[in-house]
Image (cartoon, rainbow, N blue to C red):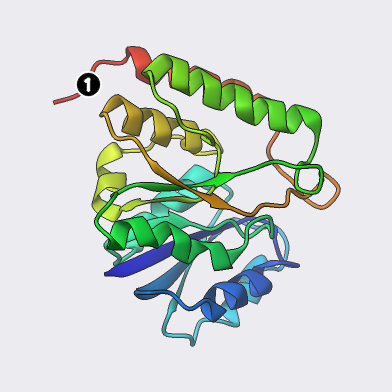
Amino acid sequence: MLLSILVPVFNEERLAAGTLKELLAVEFPCETEIVAVDDGSRDRSWEVLQTFEDNPRVRLIRHDRNRGKGAAIRTAAKSAHGDHVVVFDADGEYDAADLPRLLTPVLDGKAEVVYGSRSFGSHSAYSFWYVMGNKGITLAANILFNSYISDLETCYKLLPRQMYLDLNIRSGGFGMEAELTAKLLKRGIRPYEVPISYTARSREEGKKITWTDGVQALWLLGRERVRRNRR
């Protein structure tokens, strides 16, 4: 099995190098590749990423302009060679050491799709409204699709690469999280969830998601719920 770790990067010159070093240091139970996409950064992120261009496990791609997280992941997935893909944000909020946990159910034959589920505490939550927004979007998905997942907005979504491509995720920004989950649930695919660690950064530290992304997520869930399945 080859796992492709998809890393969208936008204006993360301070964290980009540490992110790739952290991923490269993890001992995985399978072969891995890292596909990092600079999404039109306006800082030195691309220069930082290029210091890894000689590493055989790292592949670098650059967008000429900012297109959004969803678009960066789409580019990375199309260029990846892995059997499965998983996203790792270059924002320092997730711990790369948790990634092997997501592989265990797949390698044991228990699941094809695995989500890393975050538990929010006082040390890990950005704000009350950020946590409530996450929980509200997840609750909406559970009601609309008669499911019971605990963390729709998690970055850690591991699934077969071909399945991801077949879902045809079109959302360019953060809405891709809701669109991907809605399309999985509508097809009767219930993610296997494993606990992961998480520490949200503040707006001052560079957090980019806003309340408008939450509104878009709810709209996307509703749209996918009523949309007819394509043959």
Q: Residue at x 40, y 36 (%)?
A: 180
Residue 136 in view of the camera: yes
Residue 226: x %, y % from top left: 34, 12
Specify whether 11 is left or right of 58. right
The residue sitting at 48% across, 31% down in the picture is 178
Quarter holding residue 189? top left
Give the residue number, with chain letter if any, for mark 1.
229
**Where, quadrant-wise, is the N terminus in this rendering?**
bottom left
Label 1 environment density (alpha carbons within 10 Å; few <14, some 14–19, many ≥20): few
Q: Where is residue 165? Give x, y as percent.
A: 28, 46
Q: Toward the viewer: 121 or 99? A: 121
Instruction: Pick out the residue farthest to the bottom.
Output: 54
Which of the two residues, 162 or 69, is positioned nearer the viewer here? 162
In the picture, measured across the screen, residue 76 lies left or right of residue 126, that is left
In percent of width and height, residue 108 lies at: 28, 60
SS for dot 1: loop
Q: How many numbered circles are shown? A: 1
Residue visible at 45% across and 66% down in the picture? 100
| Quarter containing the C terminus | top left
Rendered view: 145 above or below 98:
above
Residue under the image location 80 percent in, 48 percent down: 123
**Place of residue 148 in the rendered image (x, y in percent of width and height, measured from the top left):** 44, 27
Q: Residue furthest left?
A: 231
Q: Left or right of 205: which side holds 171? A: left
- Is the residue 86 above or below the residue 46 in the image? above
Q: Report which quarter residue 192 is drawn in.
A: top left
217 in relation to 117, above or below? above
Can residue 76 be seen at all in this image of the molecule?
no
- Identity of the residue furthest to the top in this view: 226
What kind of residue is marked 1?
Answer: Asn
